[in-house]
Amino acid sequence: MRTDTGQVFKLEDYRPTDYLIPETGLTFRLSPEATRLIAVLTVERRDGVAASMPLVLDGDGLTLSRIAIDGQTLAPADFFATPDQLTITTPPTAARFQLLIETELAPAHNEALMGLYRSSNVYCTQCEAEGFRRITYFLDRPDILSVYTVRIEAPHHEAPLLLSNGNPAGSGELADGWHYAVWHDPFPKPSYLFALVAGALGKVADSFVTLSGRVVELGIFVEPGKERLAGYAMDALKRSMKWDEEAFGREYDLDVFNIVAVSDFNMGAMENKGLNIFNDKYVLADQETATDADFANIEAIIAHEYFHNWTGNRITCRDWFQLCLKEGLTVFRDHEFSADQRSRAVKRIAEVRTLKAHQFPEDQGPLAHPVRPRRYREINNFYTATVYEKGSEVVRMIRTILGAETFRAGMDLYFERHDGEAATIEDFIKVFEDVSGRDLAQFSLWYHQAGTPNLTISSTHNAAAQEFTLEIEQSVPPTPSESRKRLMHIPLAFSLVGTDGKAIEYGGVEGASVEDGVIHIRKRRHMVRFSGVTERPAMSLNRGFSAPVTLSVEQRADDQFFLAGHDNDTFSRWQAFNTLLTEALISTFRQVLDGKQPGFASRLIELAGKIAGDETLEPAYRALALALPSEADIARDIGKNIDPDAIFSAREALTVAIAEANREIFSDLYDRLTDKDAFSPDAASAGRRALRNTLLDYLSLLHGGAALAARHFQSATNMTDRAAALSVLALRHNGSPETVKALAEFEAKYATDPLVMDKWFHIQASVPGPQTIHAVRALTGHPAFSMANPNRVRSLVGTFSSANQTGFHRADGEGYRFFVETVLQVEKRNPQLAARLATALRSWRSLEPARQGKAREALLSIANTENLSADLRDIIERTLA
Ligand code: LYS
């Protein structure tokens, strides 16, 4: 484990290296305890660099066994090696030389899952961001592009399959039952995209013919026996390849494209050139074991990693500060892909829910950072919702401002101008300025300034003058180390909605530039005057979530109800309804705190029933609309002095009120939605299941609810319905005989399927209330659980601490004590995973004082632990700062 040194990396310190490594040859002789790697690096001194300049290579916990330059073993005086650095003190005078480095590795003992490690007897690698330096000494930074040739040797019986990046370039038998394979990747790439896989795996094969006629062999490799679970992933891959040709003109460029699913993986997946490595959770699926959400995630992540081939691999990042250049952009691309494959409006609602659930709290708390940060202590901690999701929103805003056609022209120019390079955000913005002739300087603050901007908006209608005025004021709240903010360029899509639900015509507009239904807010205050407005319109604002901002709008409740029922833009309609629900929940929360009986406006309750039964709306939309804001959403919108128990009661009260008032509509619809057709994972079928399962959740709160959920569970023919019913039983009827029985049946049926057992852990960790901590503690001892596997840890510990408000924030602080224990326990093996878990307390300052004090104690007790990893110390200290 790399302990924290306190070193801070700064964007302004970027400097190109003195040396380049145009070619890299790697020969691995694999063995679990003692893998030998001979790296032969062609090193080139840059023009103008003095020959006396030492060559300093990065390492991380390495053991050096041999070092030679141009065939000559180096004398001890010529180099200096520590586990974390190799310095060639007097490099040859020649501008180009060959450096041979032999290291010895123990993949079987690598539990951090960075570098070369073993997962279920399969050798695999993870190098992004700085894992390659755990394999060999190197200039391990993304601006060093090298052509790799990789030879892998291993015993045939142990590793019949030997894979690396690029195209196959030879294979054969060796003595003693060993064999080898050679791979050559003609595209220069940074070390973080290197990958190796070796083991016994089953293969699903297919092929794809690109637009220009290149035949690409496709392979998905999984644990033997699980091949039939890779069909959906393969289908998603082929659809992604086709879509990138159509939507962005991007073709695949190698003869093979391989995906490997492994069961121990820190993140979702990794875009290594020609050899993507996936968390098996995002590859394996069938109706019996995967939910509709799993299918949608697989589709999105397969696409995301594939799209990286252009946005990430062909054009990579100059340094890690530019991470959003590849991630934000690639998320934007995968969002667009999913929107085209599924329902655009539904996809957009889901994206915005995710953004608000994960990015807004980050932006509003101690871990806030710009989409392109300027400082980091540990880059692993910057694979965040801000870099990914807000990064995607920023790209979306560029498209909104430029229009789809000019945006596409900008992307074409980006690919043309920067192919084969390690680029920056400035390069990216420049292409859009060049194709549009616009100045995006103010806009680019979205990359550089942290925090969620707020717009305060009010309106007046002067009937006599036929004038409608919007008064808009922007503010950006202070964030850590950025107390003063500059004014931003916010593209606010809007519509003035008339009583017929349609946009009303207006004559002229002054006070801001308004183009294609978008107000461009650039100043602190705008008075936007629309002339020729005869009737007072309702304001539909931030349509399609055109900007990732919060709104404080003065709008009559009547208008809000009108939009929730009639806005002709589906997304905006959802937004209006969601705002009404949130407002109701917040005022109920206050009633609960004051000891009052909660009451709800009957028209809100009725509207829920109307939406449910509105056959003109897609079922998936209705399901999303009826899913009340989560407890965490409500807490975020309240902002301070949070009592999670009061939020829970408020939410529960609204759920019951909606269920009781709409019982007939809901139960009639529930019956009608029963699926009689054979299972299909398509979006429309998934939408019907989602609606029915949402209705089940409401109905389960009424008389006979537990029995209904138990029937739903018993009659389920797919995992979506089965897991939904189990969740309703556990969350709404914890401890009931029906729940106990269903949990036991589920456990017995899926005991040997770890990915399905994750759902079982997840559901039990989500049960609200103070008693859940005991169940969670007990489950850490379950035979299917393991602190060494990230998926298990996330589904049990991660769910409990990040997604169970009442359980985790138990008033006596017991949840926090468990947090401290498990974070420190996980850290010993896997600091990256521990740091991720530790973000669960990032909003601790918004809790009520008693819980706040206990949360702070917990954070301090971690901070006061000696020899923390760089990963964990960084998160804890920023959280406490
Ligand atoms: N680049 C990967 C992705 O597609 C994630 C790598 C994470 C490294 N810590 O999101």
Image (spheres, rainbow, N blue to C red):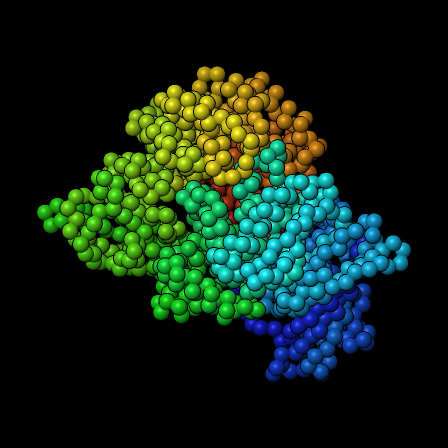
Q: Is residue 358 left or right of residue 864?
A: left
Choose top left, top right, bottom left or bottom right for residue 672: top left
Q: Which residue is found at the position 31% from the left and 37% from the top?
A: 564
Residue nearer the viewer, 532 or 464 = 532
Q: Residue furthest right?
A: 176
Please provide percent x and percent y for residue 226: 69, 40
**Residue lying at 43% horizontally and 53% vertically, measured from the top left:** 393
Res 526 visible = yes
Which of these two is toward me, 200 or 66? Answer: 200
- Above or below: residue 484 compared with residue 859: below
Residue occupying image coordinates x 76% and y 47%: 200
Answer left or right for 735 relative to 357: right
**Residue 140: x and y, percent?**
64, 65
Position of 446 with respect to 722 (left or right) is left
Q: Nearer the viewer, residue 575 or 534?
A: 534
- Give residue 587's position: percent from left, percent from top: 34, 32
Q: Residue at x 51, y 20 (%)?
A: 708
Q: Position of residue 259 (x, y in %)?
A: 65, 51
Which residue sits furthest left? 464
Can I make out residue 86 in this image? no
Toward the viewer: 584 or 641? Answer: 584
Number of dots carrying numbers:
0
